[in-house]
Image (spheres, helix red, strand yellow):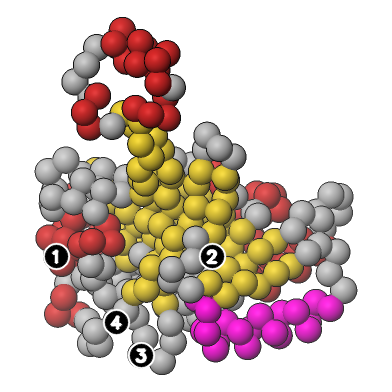
Amino acid sequence: MNITAFSKALYSTWIYYSPERILFDAGEGVATMLSNKIYAARYVFLTHGHVDHIAGLWSIINTRNNAMGDREKPLTVYYPQGNKGIEIYADFLKRANSELKFKLDFVGVGSSDKVFLRDSGSFTRYIQPFPVSHTYSEISYGYHVIDVRRRLKEEYRDISGAEIAQLVKEMGSDAITETYEKKVLTISGDTILLKKEDILDTDVLFHECTFLKKEDRKFNNHAALDDIVELVKDTQVKTLVLYHISSRYISVLDKTLRKIAIPGVKILYVHPEKIFEM
Ligand SMILES: [Zn+2]
Ligand SMILES: [Zn+2]
């Protein structure tokens, strides 16, 4: 999958998806920890404006601007359109770095917008934001990475390879195939429990899991382990990665998560004090 991540609730969260050079959130320490890799980042997708998800952006901009060598690749930061906190921060960053050596854009996206990463006939991949519930005052998003793929139309799925080859010759492959959309990665951002429809059929789900115990949650703005486990059953999710875990659980984390099982689902977690790789 090629993901590097760090996530400790309240302190810092970032997830780097290297195949598309995307950073989902940019918590404090991201430039330090990704080191040279940070220059490769092409896009940042911010889920919301809390400081533990955006503070590292200043360092990213600063290191790219001052490092030696070819650091002039553009950087585009997408964020939930209308998020005031992010807009104020973006305005500050632009003013504090008025002489940038690279192109820096902040682009507000709506939940029906698609951000195309690749769109080259045979390979289309885009980011789809979706609204989540986290704070009352500001808009928060999760993000899907979606591939547009082709498959045989239903009526041709049971026939032999030789017959298919013959049909392709006669009718062309477009006539017997159809496009469909496949979620390859879903990032929840900070949120209460996601809706089933949002996670259905995604290959890899990063779901925030601030609380291991529901009783520890004082406000309804984050998710808890038991609810996530229930949610993910029968959704075709292949890999569940729990992140944004509160550091209060460090001593019981391994023991608690070892007891969790969901049929057909591989469960991983981002330890609040370690770099995660998958
Ligand atoms: Zn957070
Ligand atoms: Zn938050």
Which callout, 1 or 3, points to the residue nearer the camera?
Answer: 3
Farthest residue toward the top? 162
- The image shows residue 98 at horizontal and vertical percentages of 84, 78
Residue on which the image places disc 4: 221
Residue on which the image places disc 2: 45
**Label 1 amino acid?**
Asp
Q: CA distance from mark 2 to mark 3?
A: 20 Å
**Label 2 amino acid?**
Phe
- The image shows residue 131 at horizontal and vertical percentages of 37, 73
Residue 60 in the image: above or below residue 136: above
**Residue visible at 29% across and 82% down in the picture:** 221
**Secondary structure category for the residue under label 4:** loop
**Residue visible at 43% across and 68% down in the picture:** 112
N-term-proximal mark, 1 vs 3: 3
**Secondary structure category for the residue under label 3:** loop
Residue on which the image places disc 3: 136
**Secondary structure category for the residue under label 2:** strand
Left/right of residue 252 with respect to residue 89 in the rendered view: left
Which callout, 3 or 4, points to the residue nearer the camera?
Answer: 3
Q: Which residues are magenta?
A: 79-98
Let me know if residue 24 appears in the view. no
Q: Is mark 4 within 8 Å of ligand 2?
A: yes
Residue on which the image places disc 1: 226
Could you say which quadrant of the image residue 120 lies in? top right
Let me know if residue 153 appears in the view. yes
Which callout, 1 or 2, points to the residue nearer the camera?
Answer: 2
